[in-house]
């Protein structure tokens, strides 16, 4: 009974949803949107990329997982920079009222800026780097866009540390470093990981935009190139890949997040 | 001069103007090895009092000295057991206690620290639960960890801030017995805050009632001259038990009792007569009602402050 319920909830119902969408897609491609490739056409045009996911035939003609891998590496670098910069800023914001009052307005102004607006600035900043400029610009954009959820969640987490824990630290006269590592960081971890998860989502959003504009090999770059090459089936392939990878990343992060839930 | 001495201590909260004085003119002396219980209403400022002794809160006026040294900051010489346990949830029983031991005795060899920690875990009968996280423990077990952590730092005075009030009656009784047993072992100076008179009588050498706030102050000190060890069943029949109990309760209900006050407040009386259905409902006719609309009146009532 339980197993069949499980199957229904996690296998049959999602499959039904996917089938409904496929049918709608098929109907739409054959009636209203003539330019939209049908599911079957998409599959025939993409199966080379899916079945030989790691093949490299040319700079912009590679298996889909190979492209994904390039994108993931770039995201990992930018994301790491975002966390390394964002977490301490979050701690300062949470711990110091003066710091918050000084920098909160500027953070609130920079936060909603789109990655598309940051990227040209990033490219300009690293103009001197020559061949590396596009990568550094993309990293800059990922880092600065993905940083904010980490910064804000860490700050909220630090402010939400119960006074009791701080009292324990005070009564025991823990040193500053010990208070940080034994009390502040463990108490903030759940909030930090929520921030990390949201940041990763944004980093993955930004990578596509960054690759499109810089033409770097990767899922986003491939998508833009195939648009220019009028192979619309591959656009859909890329969209699905981006979605699935984003979903997997989010799931992985939420597993990690659960692991760190304390109280 | 007493071991712990509070002289004319006052404390208030809030900005000037609307400031309410929580504690006023607290004078108290506790000798070394004494077990003193403060009994009072909730909200009277008991926690503020113990926080001041712990050094977490500074008094507005007056001085608090321990061993002739003014208390200015928190320190491990005054271990405190909080009402809500205050264990760090990401550390297990052993780690919670070890953190304190490691901090207070930094020069000990690791083996000695470990042994010391184990000793106190055993003292509160938690050896089987030493690897458990606080969230896996019952309230009573958590409070035992908290007591063990406090005792393991070998403090000069143990401050207990309503340690048992969050527990159910049966667990509370067991832990009271346990506190008594532990106290008999090493005769530490203990400052207990409670809202349970019986608990005070069972455990303490002296009971001092704290009058109701705002502006709470300490009442007369009542010595509990019932011989130890006190048995919780036998103590009920001891003639002094009832006398002490009555004395404390009389003070709390009488002089130190809640002050009555009157407040005037607005009263909204609802519509009394409904609308007149004979009046046609259109733009030109007079208003249909209700005929007597909501009335606002002043009312004066007596409340417990």
Image (cartoon, rainbow, N blue to C red):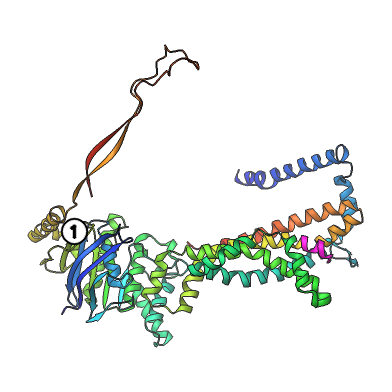
From the viewer's side, name the closer residue of B55 and A250. Answer: B55
Residue at image coords 25%, 41%:
B264
Predominant secondary structure in magenta?
helix
Outermost residue to the front: B284
Outermost residue to the left: B239
From the viewer's side, name the closer residue of A141 and B96. Answer: A141
Q: Residues within 10 Å of mark 1 (few under 14, many from 20)?
A: many
Q: Position of residue A180 (x, y in %)?
A: 49, 74
Residue B44, picture quadrant:
bottom left
Residue at image coords 77%, 63%:
A210
Q: Position of residue A185 (x, y in %)?
A: 51, 70
Quadrant in which the N terminus of chain A appears: top right
Residue bearing mark 1: B211
Q: Position of residue A224 (x, y in %)?
A: 85, 58
Residue B53, picture quadrant:
bottom left
Left or right side of A108 for A17: right
Examine the structure image and report whether residue A209 is included in the region drawn in magenta.
Answer: yes
Outermost residue to the top: B278
From the viewer's side, name the closer residue of A129 and B89. Answer: A129
Examine the structure image and report whether residue A72 is included in the region drawn in magenta.
Answer: no
Q: Position of residue A227 (x, y in %)?
A: 88, 55
Q: Chain of mark 1?
A: B
Q: Is residue B95 visible?
A: yes
Q: Which residues are magenta?
A: A208-216
């Amino acid at each position: 009974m339980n197993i069949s319920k499980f199957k229904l909830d996690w296998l049959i119902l999602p499959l039904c949803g996917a089938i409904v969408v496929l049918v709608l897609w098929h109907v739409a491609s054959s009636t209203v949107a003539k330019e939209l490739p049908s599911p079957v056409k998409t599959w025939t045009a993409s199966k080379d990329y899916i079945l030989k996911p790691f093949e490299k035939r040319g700079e912009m003609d590679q298996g889909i997982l190979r492209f994904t891998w390039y994108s993931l590496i770039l995201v990992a670098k930018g994301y790491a920079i975002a966390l390394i910069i964002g977490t301490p800023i979050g701690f300062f914001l949470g711990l110091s009222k003066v710091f918050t009052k000084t920098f909160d307005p500027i953070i609130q102004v920079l936060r909603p800026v789109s990655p598309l607006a940051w990227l040209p600035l990033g490219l300009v900043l690293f103009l001197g780097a020559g061949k590396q400029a596009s990568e550094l610009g993309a990293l800059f954009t990922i880092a600065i866009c993905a940083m904010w959820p980490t910064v804000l969640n860490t700050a909220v987490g630090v402010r939400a540390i119960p006074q009791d824990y701080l009292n324990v630290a005070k009564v025991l006269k823990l040193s500053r470093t010990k208070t940080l590592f034994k009390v502040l960081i463990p108490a903030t971890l759940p909030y930090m990981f929520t921030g990390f998860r949201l940041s990763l989502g944004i980093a993955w959003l930004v990578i596509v935009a960054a690759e499109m504009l810089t033409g770097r090999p990767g899922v986003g770059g491939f998508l833009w190139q195939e648009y220019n090459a009028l192979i619309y089936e591959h656009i859909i392939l890329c969209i699905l890949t981006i979605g699935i990878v984003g979903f997997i990343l989010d799931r992985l992060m939420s597993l990690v997040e659960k692991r760190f839930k304390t109280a | 001069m007493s071991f712990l001495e509070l002289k004319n201590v006052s404390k208030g909260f809030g900005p000037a103007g609307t400031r309410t004085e929580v504690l006023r003119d607290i004078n108290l002396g506790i000798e070394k090895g004494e077990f003193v219980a403060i009994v009072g209403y909730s909200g009277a400022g008991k926690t503020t009092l113990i926080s001041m002794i712990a050094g977490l809160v500074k008094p507005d006026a007056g001085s608090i000295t321990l061993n002739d040294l003014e208390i200015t900051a928190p320190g491990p010489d005054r271990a405190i057991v909080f009402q809500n346990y205050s264990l760090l949830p990401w550390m297990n029983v052993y780690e919670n206690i070890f953190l304190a031991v490691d901090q207070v005795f930094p020069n000990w060899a690791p083996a000695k620290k470990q042994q010391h920690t184990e000793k106190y875990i055993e003292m509160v009968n938690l050896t089987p639960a030493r690897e458990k996280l606080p969230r896996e423990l019952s309230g009573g077990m958590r409070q035992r960890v908290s007591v063990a952590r406090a005792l393991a730092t070998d403090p000069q005075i143990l401050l207990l801030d309503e340690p048992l009030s969050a527990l159910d009656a049966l667990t509370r009784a067991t832990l009271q017995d346990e506190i008594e047993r532990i106290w008999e072992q090493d005769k530490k100076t203990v400052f207990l805050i409670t809202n349970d008179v019986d608990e005070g009588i069972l455990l303490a050498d002296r009971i001092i009632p704290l009058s109701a706030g705002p502006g709470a102050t300490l009442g007369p000190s009542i010595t509990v001259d019932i011989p130890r060890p006190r048995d919780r069943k036998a103590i009920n029949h001891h003639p002094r038990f009832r006398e002490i109990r009555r004395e404390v309760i009389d003070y709390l209900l009488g002089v130190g009792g809640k002050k009555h006050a009157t407040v005037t407040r607005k009263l909204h009386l609802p519509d009394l007569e409904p609308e007149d259905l004979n009046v046609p409902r259109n733009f030109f006719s007079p208003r249909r009602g209700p005929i007597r609309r909501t009335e606002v009146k002043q009312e004066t009532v007596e409340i417990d402050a």
